[in-house]
């Protein structure tokens, strides 16, 4: 977490030194499983190529009362007189999930486990979820306002620190750690141009 935050601050500092204009917007969040919180999103417009439209870098951070947090960034850059577009995104989310249930055998499927061998259940399901997402899209102008390109994406999801109810819930729902990736072709129509 600290390394990611330091990289975030370094990127914003470099952007300020380059004389870019930064706009900062507050974030407010409320979610029953991760609590209430807030954060900031910084938006920077810059010229990656003097013959192209303005490029945009957006980075943000969010923290909630459950000690959950999210860090994210998106960069959309234009090159070669607007004929090449690059969109890059990255996000890391640490969600400390907690929600209540009722011991009626429906929401928390404890099945045939005898109640006397279970530790005391406190009525809440808790577990942590770590999610990392990365994505990249490249588009190239093929004719007029039409672009052709491709994208790659990766998502990694890990679950940790469950309480007894959390372990039962995750097992019953078949939830487990996962990693997945994707790639594909893209077709776009974009009329913006500085040429």
Image (cartoon, rainbow, N blue to C red):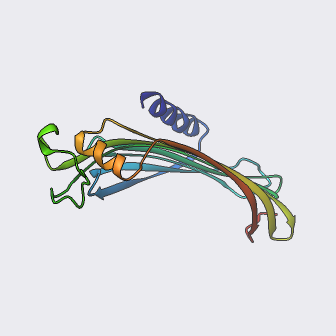
Quick one: quadrant of the N terminus?
top left
| For residue 132, above or below residue 144 | above
For the C terminus, give its image quadrant: bottom right
71 and 133: which is toward the camera: 133
Q: Residue furthest right?
A: 143
Q: Which residue is the extreme one toward the top? A: 3
Total residue callouts? 0
Is 114 above or below relative to 7? Answer: below
Residue 183 lies left or right of residue 93; in this view the side is right
Residue at left 73%, top 68%?
Answer: 192
In the foreground, 162 or 133 = 162
Q: Position of residue 182 (x, y in %)?
A: 66, 51
* Residue 158 x, y percent position in the rendering: 44, 40
The percent position of residue 33, horizontal first and vertical second, equals 28, 53
Relative placement, left or right, of 27 versus 55 is left
Whole-percent x, y for residue 189 in the image: 75, 71
Q: Can residue 27 be spotted in the picture?
A: yes
Q: Residue at x 73, y 57 (%)?
A: 184
* Residue nearest the observer in this picture, 90 or 101: 101
- Do we see residue 138 in this rendering? no
Left or right: residue 155 compared with residue 189 = left
Height in image: 33 above or below 9? Answer: below
């Amino acid at each position: 977490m600290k390394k990611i935050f330091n990289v975030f601050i370094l990127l914003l500092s470099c952007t300020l030194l380059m004389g870019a204009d930064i706009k900062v917007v507050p974030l407010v969040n409320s979610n029953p499983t991760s609590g209430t919180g807030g954060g900031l999103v910084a938006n920077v417009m810059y010229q990656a190529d003097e013959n192209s439209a303005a490029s945009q870098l957006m980075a943000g951070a969010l923290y909630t009362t459950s000690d959950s947090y999210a860090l994210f960034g998106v960069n959309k850059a234009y090159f070669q007189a607007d004929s090449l577009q690059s969109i890059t995104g990255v996000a890391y989310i640490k969600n400390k999930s907690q929600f209540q249930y009722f011991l009626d055998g429906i929401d928390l499927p404890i099945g045939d486990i005898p109640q006397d061998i279970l530790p005391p259940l406190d009525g809440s399901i808790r577990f942590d979820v770590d999610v990392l997402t990365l994505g990249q899209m490249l588009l190239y102008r093929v004719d007029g306002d039409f672009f052709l390109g491709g994208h790659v994406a990766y998502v990694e999801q890990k679950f940790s620190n469950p309480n007894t109810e959390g372990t039962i819930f995750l097992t019953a729902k078949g939830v487990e750690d996962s990693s997945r990736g994707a790639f594909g072709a893209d077709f776009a129509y974009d009329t913006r141009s500085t040429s």
